[in-house]
Image (cartoon, rainbow, N blue to C red):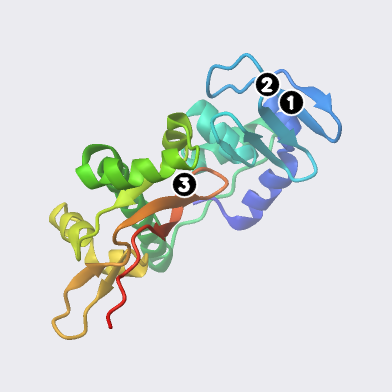
Amino acid sequence: MIDQQTIAKIMDAAQIVDVVSDFVTLKKRGVNYLGLCPFHNEKTPSFTVSPAKGIFKCFGCGKGGKSVHFIMEHEQLSYADALRFLAKKYHIEIIEKEQTDEEKLAQSERESLFAVNDYAVKYFIDNLNDTRDGQAIGLSYFRERGFKDEIIKKFQLGYSLNEFSAFSDKAIKNGYNAELLEKLGLSIRRENDNSLFDRFRGRVMFPVHSISGKVVAFGGRILKKKKKTA
């Protein structure tokens, strides 16, 4: 494990324009730089690099992040290997330390949480495209509001079925941990029988992405209002 002091030194040295310029031809536009995105085919530049913020962002494919995230994506490396790549570029000695048991557990849990979110986003996308309600309600909602199919796909929009525990039941059946489902807020535990039910039901789903593109949370919009009783 690379120690935090070394990571900080790498991050300080790896200026975003310098790193990206090794792979992308950039032209200065005002305070930022512009170029053709290396992650998808485009004829009009939509790839922006901000030296002030220290990040890159493509407004065509949505990818973005800091220097280390660019190297991870471009070179298909893990976070640690991307740091090593940058350390070599800037002649920084890597100092590694053994992870404690607590750090190993925390890292394992973070990876598991991301895995659950990845499963959830695919589940909601499948509902949107492959179920009757998803197409009739979810897709209709998006298209009525002018969302083009490429935008729906790009931002991984989806639909949650209007069923009590469809997502929770399927996630557990596929081997995902019930406590993680609850911790992420995707499922809620009933007090009377300790079973799980879905937080999001009958909603169009909007995944929240980190700057590096990972799904970190979900938002849902209810489409059907409950009928008032006299």
Q: Position of residue 207 (x, y in %)?
A: 44, 51
Q: What distance separates the C-alpha of mark 1 from that of mark 3?
A: 24 Å
Q: What distance separates the C-alpha of mark 3 from that of mark 2?
A: 24 Å
Disc marking residue 25: none
Task: Please give the name of the residue rendered at 54% of the width and 27% of the height, measured from the top-left corner.
Answer: 74
Q: Position of residue 212 (x, y in %)?
A: 54, 43
Q: Residues within 10 Å of mark 3 (few under 14, many from 20)?
A: some
| Left or right: 104 in relation to 49 | left
Q: Position of residue 209 (x, y in %)?
A: 50, 49
Q: Residues within 10 Å of mark 2 (few under 14, many from 20)?
A: some
Where 37 falls versus 203 (above or below)?
Answer: above
Q: Nearer the viewer, residue 31 or 152?
A: 152
C-beta proximity under 8 Å, tags 2 and 1: yes
* Dot placed on the residue nearer the N-terminal end, 1 or 3: 1
Quadrant in which residue 164 is drawn: bottom left
Mark 3 lies on residue: 214
Q: Nearer the viewer, residue 158 or 74?
A: 158
Give the farthest residue toward the front. Answer: 230
- What type is the residue that disc 3 sits on? Lys
Mark 2 lies on residue: 45
Q: What distance separates the C-alpha of mark 2 from that of mark 1?
A: 7 Å
Q: Position of residue 153 (x, y in %)?
A: 42, 34
| Left or right: 189 in relation to 28 | left
- What type is the residue that disc 2 sits on? Pro
Mark 1 lies on residue: 34
- What type is the residue that disc 1 sits on? Leu
Q: Nearer the viewer, residue 118 or 92?
A: 118
